[in-house]
Amino acid sequence: MTYLAKPKLHHPGLTKNAVGYTRRDYEGKISTLCAGCGHDSISAAIVQACWELDIQPHRVAKLSGIGCSSKTPDYFLGNSHGFNSVHGRMPSVLTGANLANRELIYLGVSGDGDSASIGLGQFAHSMRRGVNMVYIVENNGVYGLTKGQFSATADKGSKSKRGVINSDEPLDMIGMALLLGATYVARSFSGDKSQLVPLIKGAIEHKGAAFIDVVSPCIAFNNHAGSTKSYEYVRQHNEAVNRMDFIEGREEITADYAPGEVITVEQHDGRFLRLKKLSAEHDPTDRVRTMNYVQEHASRGEVVTGLLYIDPKAIDMHEHLNTVDTPLNQLDVEQLCPGASALEKINASLR
Amino acid sequence: MKPTDITRPDYFHKVVDCQWACPAHTPVPEYIRLIAAGQYDDAYMVNWNSNVFPGILGRTCDRPCEPACRRGRVEEGNVEMRKPSLHGEPHAEPVAICRLKRVAADNKSAHQVSSRMPKAPKKKNGKKIACIGAGPASLTVARDLAPLGYEVTIFESDQKGGGFMRTQVPRFRLPEAVIDEEVGYIMDIGNVQLKSNTRIESLRSVLDQSFDAVFVGTGAPRGRDLEAPGRLEAAAHIHIGIDWLSSVSFGHITQIGKNVIVLGGGNTAMDCCRSAKRLGGEDVKVIVRSGYEEMKASPWEKEDAIEEGIPILNFLVPKAFIHHEGKLTGMSFDKVKAQYDAKGRRNLVATGEPEQIFPCDDVLVAIGQENAFPWIERDIGIDFDEWKMPIVDTVTMQSTLPTVFFGGDAAFGPKNIIWAVAHGHDAAVSIDKFCQGENLQDRPDPMTNLISQKMGIHEWSYDNDISDELRNRVPLKDQKITLKDIKVEVELGFDARAGLAEAQRCLNCDVQTVFSEKLCIECDACVDICPMDCITFTPNGEEEAVRATLNAPSLHAKTQDLYVSTELKMTARIMAKDEDVCLHCGLCAERCPTGAWDMQKYLIEMTHAGAGCRKPQRKAA
C-alpha cells in the first residue's frame, strides 16, 4: 500500500474509449492492500476490461463480502455502484439486486474464505440459479487478514509460512462451479493479465452465471517455497488450455489458423468468442470432459487455466423465473399495484 | 536490448533533463528542494558552485533547462482536467526553474553566503593567469582558479567587471546591485586583480608579460550594421543596438525620438525596444524579416515586449532609410513570405505587394553580433578559420597557441551567459592541468553519487506527492512606474509562498527509479500503480520491437531512453521503463513487495579545476 493518492496526471498518450473515458477514469481509490498483492493486479485487469468494453461506469454494480479480496471493489470503478455485504453473503445480496434491476452489470468479488468457507452455500445457489453475474474469486489459499491460516482452497500437502503441512482436502471451486451449472467457468492467474483481461471481458458479456477463479498470491503469507499459490509455483505449473480473443464485431474470423487450432463460440447476442487452443484434448463446450480434464491435471499438481467451460446459449435466472423485462425500479405504481380487481382475478385462478 | 548500464555517469544524468540541458549542469532539482525547504543559503550555494551568477541568471538566463523540463511533457494531454487559470487557457508548462533560482538569490542571507565562499590560500602556487575581458567567462575562470592559489589578473576596458551583463542587459531586467554583489563575491576570493579601464590592444603585449596562461573572454563586441540606401545620410539617428544599450547603461544616452523602429528579432532587439519605450519612445515597434515563431528571441522576452505595448511586425525586409535634409523620417520595407524547399529549408520570397513605409525618428539596428579580434596579431601562433574565428578545441577551450584559451562568446560566437560560465569552467580545468603539466584531454568523469531515499516503509527523504498546480506567474511592477524609469526592475520575483508552490511542481527527476532484477518476483504491482504507464514487462528484442510492446506509446523515442533490465528468472522477460514521462513519484517502489524498485538520489558533480580534475590518486586502504 501507499499513503499517497495516485497522482491525477496520466500518460499524455492515454486514449479515450467509445464512451469518452480514459482507462484511468475506471480506477478507484488507492489500494490499502499489501505491496505486491495479487488482488491489485486483478483490480487493474477489471479496470482494463471495463475500459476496453466501453462500459458506462454507472451501469456496473460491484458487490463483495468480507476479506482482503472483498476490500478491492473500493480500488476499481470508483464511479460505479458498490455494496460491501456481510461475510459470505455477497451472492444473495447480488441475486436480490439483480432481480430488482436486471439492466446493470453485476460484478461479485469474493475470496476463498468468503466463498469457499462461510459463503459456500451462497456461492452454490447463485451458480445453480444462473444469476447473470461475473463471480470472481480472488484465490490465495490463506486467510491473510488473520495472518495466514490455510483456507479451504489450500492444496493438501502444501506448506504454510510457519512450516505446517496442510492435511485437509482442498475445496475445488472450479469443479463445484461446473457441477452446479455455471455456464462460463474460467481460471486465471493475477500475474498474467494478457490471459485474465479477455476472460473478464468474456464473463461480462456472458449471459448467465460466469465464474472466474483467479489464483492471486498472498505476498505476505503465501508466497514461499512449499506453497502452491505462490508467484513462482503458479508460473511453473500453469497449464493454459487456450487463449481467448474477444471479438467485438459480429463476423466470424477463422483465417490464419489451421483447423482445430481455433474454436469460435457464438454468444447469445450473435457475437463471437475466439479461443486459440493450446491443449488438443480440451473442449471447452464439453462440461463432463472438462471436469475430468481439470481433475486429472490437478492430480499432477498442475494449475489448469483459460476458459474451461462455456455454454454460449445459456439462459439466466430471469428467464427461469419468467420475470418482467423491465427493471422493477422503472415500473410505475399502477403496474406494480394493479388494484383489487387484478388481485381478485389471480386469487380466482388459484381456487 | 542490452541491459542498461546505470553506472555510466551519463545515463541517469540524462534523466535529469534540466541538468542535462544546462550547459553548466546545475543540479536543478537539488536546489529546488532546498528552496522548498526554505534553505535559501544552501540553494544559493548549490547554484553558485555550478553557475557562479545565480542572482543574475535568475533574471536573465536563456534557460535551456525549461524547454527540456519533464514537467512540460508530463502536463501534455493533462491540462483539460486542470482548473481554468486566471492567465488564459491552461497549457502544459515547465517548472519556472529560472525564476526559482532568483528566489534563492533574493531570500538568502548575503552574510551567510559570503562566509561560505572559498578564499584564496595564503600560499600562492606561483602561477599567473591573465584573463582578457571581465565578463562571465573570465570571472568564472577567476573563481575556479583563485582558490587553488593561482594569481589571476583580469584586464577590462570598462570601469567595473561584469562585461555584457553590466553593459548591455538593461537595468529594468537586472539591477546593478545584483551585478555588484555577484561580481564582488569573485573579487573577494582574493588573488584576483581587476585592471579596469585597461583596453588590450595587442595580445602579444599580454603574452610578453610572462603569464603562465592567458584566457580570452572578450565576448562578441561588434553589432552588425545594416547596409541600405540612406544609411550614411541619416546616420545620426541610426544606432547599433548593443552600442546604444551600453550607452544607455552608462547614462550617456537618456532619450530617444517619439517614433522608434527596432530592427531584428533577437533578445537584443527586445532589450532595445523596451529600453526605447522608457526613454521617451511613444510609438516603438519591432520589425523582423522572419515570422514570429522563427524569431531568435526567447518566447518570454517577446511576450514581455508585447505586454508593454510594443508591436512586433513580421516578414518585412528593410529596403531603405528615408531621410529629408539629413534627418531620418522613416523606413521602407518589402513584404515577404516564407517558402520551404524540398529539403525543408526556408526561403523568404517577395510577395510582390507594394513596399511598406513606416515613419520614424530613430532606428535601432539589432540584427546580430559579431566577433572581432583586431587586437590579436595573426603571427603569434593562433590560427583563425575562414569566418575569422580562432580555432578553439571544443572540449579543452585551448587555441592553437597552447598558452591561450578562449571562452564565452569569444570562443564560438554569440551564445549567452550560462554558456560563458560553462566555457569558463572547462577552460579553468584546462588551465589548471596545463599549468601542472598534465594532459588536457585526460579529463576525469564527473563525480556521481547514488543514495537511497528510503526512510521508512512509505517514507522518502523527498516529497513524492505530485502537485497538480499550473505554473505560477511572476508578479510584475505596475507599468505606470516601470515604463517611466529605466532603472526600475519590472519583475518582482516570486515571494516565498509562490516560490514554494512553484518548487512543488518540480518532479525530482534526480531521484531515480533504480531496479534490481534479482529481487523482482514479477508481481506486476509496479505496472499497475504507475500513473504514467512507464513500466512494462516484455520479451526482449531490438529496441524498436521492445518499444512497440510498451504499455504506453513512446512519445520521444529519440531523446528519452528505455531503462531495461536483464532477463528475469521466472519468465525470461525484461523490465522496460520508458523514462520519458516518469513522475518520480516513487509509487513503483512503494508498491514493490521486495524492494526491487528503489528511489535513489543521483547527484552529479561536474569536474571543476582542482583536485577533481586530477587522476584519482588511490591510496592503499
Image (cartoon, coloured by chain):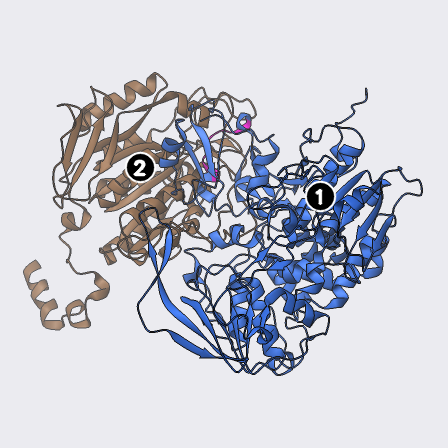
Chain colours: A brown, B blue
Is residue A70 rendered to the left or right of residue B384? left
Name the image quarter holding the N terminus of chain B.
top left
The label shown at residue A212 is 2
Q: Nearer the viewer, residue A152 or A139?
A: A139
Position in image of residue B542 (x %, y %):
39, 28
Vertical side of B117 occupied by A234: above or below: above
Name the image quarter holding the C terminus of chain B.
top right
Q: How many neighbours does mark 1 have within 10 angstroms: few (below 14), some (14-19), or many (20 or more)? A: many
Q: CA distance from mark 2 to mark 1?
A: 65 Å
- Mark in front: 2 vs 1: 1
Please, what secondary structure does the residue beneath circle 2 have? strand
Is residue B520 a member of the stretch shown in magenta? yes
Is residue B337 rendered to the left or right of residue B585? left
- Residue drawn at 26 percent across, 45 percent down: A204
Name the residue that disc number 1 marks: B425
Is residue A14 a member of the stretch shown in magenta? no
Position in image of residue B598 (x %, y %):
59, 37
Position in image of residue A253 (x %, y %):
14, 35
Q: How many marks?
A: 2
Chain of the residue displaying label 2: A
- Residue drawn at 65 percent across, 59 percent down: B100
Position in image of residue A118 (x %, y %):
40, 40
Amino acid under label 1? His
- Can residue B94 be seen in this snapshot? yes
* Discs 2 and 1 lie in a common subunit: no
- Residue stretch in magenta: B519-526
The label shown at residue B488 is none
Vertical side of B319 occupied by A216: above or below: above
Find residue A288 and report its image quarter.
top left
Is residue A50 rendered to the left or right of residue B139? left
